[in-house]
Image: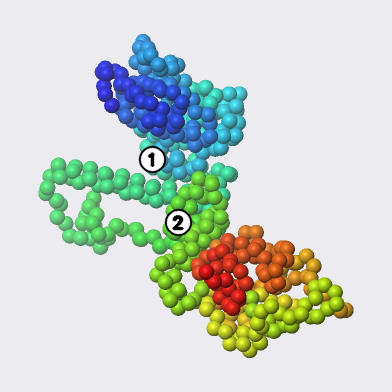
Amino acid sequence: MTTTSPLRKQLKMTADECDACLGAATNHTIVIKARTLNCRAELAGARQERRGIAAAGMPMPPCRVISQTPGERAPAGVREESPVVSALAFHPAADTFPLLDQERLAALAEDIKANGLLHPIIVDHEGRILDGRNRYLACQMAGIEPKIARANGADPYRFVWSQNAERRDLEPGQRVLIWHRLARLSDEWQAEQTRRREEANRKRAEAVSQVAQQRERQADGTFGPGRLSPDKTPGTSKPAPTHAHVEAATATGASPATAARALALKNSAPDLAQEVIDGHLSLPAATREAKKRTVVAALNDTAAREVKAAAGLYDVLVIDPPWPAAKIERDQRPNQVGLDYPIMTEDEIAALAIPAAKDCHVWLWTTQRFLPVAFRLLEGWGLKYVCTFVWHKPGGFQPVGLPQYNCEFALYARKGSPAFLDTKAMPVCFEAPRKGHSEKPEVFYDMVRRTTGGRRLDMFNRRAIEGFDGWGNEAPHG
């Protein structure tokens, strides 16, 4: 930044270069006073101010004169206006809490217009806002000069928490993560203050007499009046250790389970934890996404996939065996003369080596007639039955004197402990049209692709299925 006069500094830039304007449409000049405030610090404050406006979804005002030397006019090309509100930066502690959305901020601005600013903006010794960012932005919208009060210099992170801990718009998990961040920053701030005090004390001690009073150590751990042993403080004891999630739950009013999930998310997926803090995700949604990432990462691990490929193992199996059924010859349509594919007996199907990985999802297709056989097969293959998916078909075979068989079943079983990537919109009953003989609907495969990851195999497939390897006499060959 080039100095043009002792009391005035200018910064000229085009809109596409100016992150303070965040994309304003015209060239501009910012004029900054250079008296008691550092020029760069004030420019940073202006940028922070405009970022806050943008984050709140408010229309971005044009660049204005932040301040001028009295009696001095703004240069040509600069919009001149009296500085209704000084540019104030936000303290990092305050930025931990999310800002109000545009609608609520506009409502606050209207209230301030009607009733005035009832609570002042609290700033620290550097003029950064500790409490009142929303009131500050609302004052800008209302064109009202805010009342400013200065904090007493105590721990800013504890202060910000005390002013915002009871906000009703915070979810429990969000509250836990914000508290944990402020508590960590508070510890760091206090440690720095302690370091500074100890350094000051050390320097003062070096400035006084080097002759120390020599006395015999007393039973209470002191060397006499006014001198404490460096290794013992009478009447004190080390506090009992506390689990982090219990401490967080106590401080925020959340349940210990919620606090534990929030802190686990902070450790495993800091970016998702930030989304929760910002109010963009709920803790349950962020936790599901983190779990999904973990599962996908494990399934897509290159080394693990190579091992499975070499062993011919899969993370997902869809099995549609050629059950030992004969077509029925009828005088009415459809007239079935013989099966179009070779069939297998129950013993032959049971003898198949199922290429399931250590943790594997398995769907076994069957019909009403072969339901008991299908359950026996799952048990014989060492799989644990979980539930039954039902394909509701438009019409179907109706035996004489019995109901119409207008559905087929896909028994879902597991080997090990596989996890679904997503269970939203995953009903066990679905409708889909019938196509070729024994051809399973695409909606089923869409569901499997969406909810599982890793290597997939469609055993006895009769057509090429995206995302699946094929196996069987009828499997398409390239």
Which residue does the image show at 27% across and 47% down from the upper left? Answer: 195
Is the image coloured rainbow, by chain, by secondary structure, or in one colour? rainbow
Numbered disc in front, either 2 or 1: 2
Local SS, label 1? loop
Corner quadrant of residue 221: bottom left
In terms of sequence position, does the residue under pointer 2 or pointer 1 come before the other?
Answer: 1
Nearer the observer, 177 or 465 = 465
Q: Residue furthest right?
A: 401
Nearer the observer, 180 or 103 = 103
The mark found on residue 75 in the picture is none
The mark found on residue 154 in the picture is 1
Q: Which residue position holds label 2?
A: 269
| Coordinates of residue 63 in the picture (x, y in percent) | 43, 23
Corner quadrant of residue 340: bottom right
Which residue does the image show at 30% across and 21% down from the upper left? Answer: 9
Circle 1: residue type:
Ala
Q: CA distance from mark 2 to mark 1?
A: 32 Å
Work out whether 169 lies above or below 295: above
Q: Residues within 10 Å of mark 2 (few under 14, many from 20)?
A: some
Work out whether 406 lies above or below 285: below
| Coordinates of residue 303 in the picture (x, y in percent) | 40, 70
| Coordinates of residue 188 in the picture (x, y in percent) | 34, 49
